[in-house]
Amino acid sequence: MPDPTVAGGPTTGVRRGWTQPGAARLVTSLMFALHALVFASWTAHIPLVKQRLELDAGGLGLALLGAALGSVASMLLAGAAIARWGSRVVVGSTCVAFGLTALGVPLAGSGPTLFGALFCWGAAYGALDVAMNAQAITIERSYGRPILSSFHAWWSLGALAGSGLGIAAVHAGVRLSAQFAALGTATAAVAFALVAFMIPGDGSAESVRIVVPFGDRRLLSLGMIVLTGLLCEGAAADWTAVYLTDEVRVTPAVAGSGYAAFALAMFAGRIAGDRLVAAFG
């Protein structure tokens, strides 16, 4: 994973003559939002997929595990790819893969095939996540002040928009296959238009490296914080709509609003993050 502590200064890895950091910040923020929009648009459809495939809670849980396993498997590979080619190249290629692998999710006809489709989508999703954050760290160095949380605030805005899109699609009776056909192909199509404005030159082994945390208590501590945070985020994304549908007995269209509320709360926390870091470290 990208390690922001190994830079020699705020402009390490940035070649200012190639692009303006402001433009790179804007398009990377849009990439964060697009990443979240496509993902979050799926959450409102999960109860309908569960019903269509006739899965119980355990079967759905195993299928959804595919996305997490694919994401973890790809993250180590993404770090090595960024070290060799730079985050801009990896963002572009994995964004295309993210859009195209989404097309396979609605085609799944059983729990095992849903697991496989989500594994592939999760692999693209996770690699893109790492590459986006590596680019964001490079941009933050060029600014010389904390701005990383603002990128994640854009992700939360994208998640809020994606939740709304998914809710509207379910309410209108739009199938997940049609929704992902539109979103997936659009995501793949705009990928390289966005990355053209990103900052190159951050692909050295000094700026990106893979770290095994178990020998460093600080990294292990941060890893555990991330683990617990993502457990909560993953539970909200995967199970909120199912819970509201199966237990609270709301309609599928209303069930999608649960994750939308979660995304809004994430945005509120993240929009304040950079100021908190600047003030308190």
Image: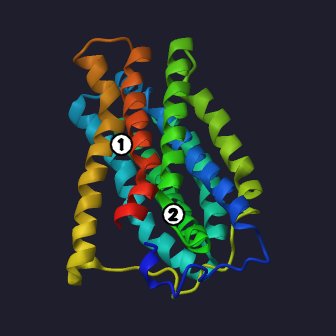
Question: Residue at image x 36%, y 26%?
Answer: 258
Name the image quarter holding residue 227: bottom left
Residue matched to label 2: 133
Residue type marked 2: Asn
Q: Secondary structure at mark 1?
A: helix
- What colour scheme does the image use? rainbow
Q: CA distance from mark 1 to mark 2?
A: 31 Å
Q: Dot 2: within a 10 Å radius of its alpha carbon, few (fewer than 14), some, or many (20 or more) residues?
A: many
Question: Residue at image x 64%, y 37%?
Answer: 183
Question: Residue at image x 37%, y 20%?
Answer: 255
Percent position (x, y) of residue 204?
57, 86
Residue matched to label 1: 112
Kindly tell me whether residue 242 is visible in this rendering. yes
Of badges 1 and 2, the one in the foreground is 2
Percent position (x, y) of residue 89?
66, 69
Front residue (pair 125, 227): 227
Is 168 left, or right, of 72 in this rendering? right
Front residue (pair 117, 212): 212
Q: Secondary structure at mark 2?
A: helix
Q: Is residue 165 above or below residue 144?
A: above
Question: Residue at image x 38%, y 36%?
Answer: 265
